[in-house]
Amino acid sequence: MQKIIITGGERLKGRVRISGSKNAALPIMAATLLTNGVTTLSNIPRLKDVTTMARVLRTLGAKVEFKEGRLKIDTTNVDRFLAPYNLVKTMRASFLVFGPLLAKLGRARVSLPGGCAIGSRPVDLHLRGFEELGAEVSMGGGYTQVTPVRSKTPEASASLVARTSNGVKRDGLLGAEIYLDFPSVGATENLMMAATLAKGKTTIENAAKEPEIVDLANFLNKMGAKIKGAGRDTIRIEGVKELKGTDYSIIPDRIEAGTYIIASAITRGDIILEGAKINHLESLVTKLHEAGIEIEDENGAIKVKAGRIKAVNVKTMPYPGFPTDMQAQFMALMSITPGISIITETIFENRFMHVSELLRMGADIKIEGSSAVVKGVKSLSEAPVMATDLRASAALILAGLIAKGKTEISRIYHLDRGYERIVEKLSNLGAKIERIKQ
């Protein structure tokens, strides 16, 4: 076991390079299963989740290797359709192999997913979408299995025939009109990947609009898919017969960028972020401007400088709204900002687990239903705290940066899932932070 020790009070200054996006890399890695060739991905972050996804792909028959800062994936011999429990339980994104396997091999058997314990994240939207594409879903023994519906009598398959582009009854996935009850990122990605090889045209209404959705669509299109509308409410996919391997560079991680922006603000620092895209952070930037923090796009880099900060309210929403993945970090900032802020969580019902740990450091926070009322205090103080999930881990580090004394953070394995070399990067900015074995 390891822990992080932070001696607070240092003003962060300097430049930091933002790594590739974890949430873009994982679905793109899964999407390579749609091909029969070699794909090379650059700007891939070296994270535990990326390593886990690589293990999942190898289990399915792919060859995966990191070489000179790139990830090379050869899916020529992928012939297995089972994603086992021991891998999927550790990372929810493993479920994203479902769509590609179903489209490519005609069947998939995947364990129900795990990941951070931040609330219920059901996969029913994924499965209902697969059914609309003409698949048959069954569950048992902790696994979900999906296979395309085979041709039946004309009466039994009438609704299926109605969804084909030319009215001809066929085996395999068939283009469909799909409406998502919630703009789920994972469901949008899984269904978009499955539809690339489906016969006919597919429309996904109320689709997720995150930059990671756009990046996945751009990657699929570079492999030969025909996808339009990614980043908007409606995505249209025209199925193709095959996709080919390609070279592709992953977008920068907007959540990592947002975390370092708040690190600059909370320490009254002066940081320049290299490689980040400010247009991916519009809702966060708007709220931070409202709070009195200067954020500018400077020749492709983001410059952050904090002035006099004031309390503001935030409400998490699907993109382009305020990201739920930045809620914990923003709360850490508001905990030492004069005034009262109300932070409302609308995406996950169990994403205030970091509150109890911030209270141990002297924060004044009260939970009222789906909202947290944060009354800014003059300072936080040292305390042993425990990380409960990935973004909570980042929030506790931010709090430790400005707390008096030494803050000890345990259960830091969550950090390795989403932040590349965070201790090294913060140290280079002037933080007194170290990672030690317990």
Image: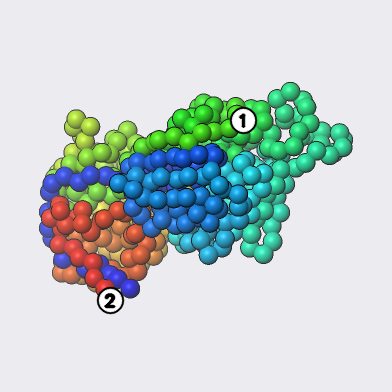
Which residue sits at x=48%, y=36%? 245
Residue 208 is situated, as x and y percent measured from the top left of the image, at 50, 38
Residue furthest top in the image: 166
Residue matched to label 1? 241
Q: Say whether disc 2 or disc 1 marks the residue closer to the N-terminus.
A: 1
Q: Which mark is residue 438?
A: 2
On the picture, is 87 further left or further right than 340? right
**Looking at the image, which is closer to me, 235 or 174?**
174
Screen quadrant of the C terminus: bottom left
**Residue 300: image location, x then y, percent:** 23, 32
- Residue at image coords 25%, 53%: 333
State how far apart marks 2 and 1 are (Cα): 54 Å
The part of the image, by quadrant, that contains residue 375 is bottom left
In the rendered structure, which amino acid carries the disc numbered 1?
Answer: Lys
Position of residue 96 relative to residue 244, above or below, is below
Q: Residue at x 44, y 50 (%)?
A: 64
Residue 207 lies, with reference to residue 342, above or below; the image says above
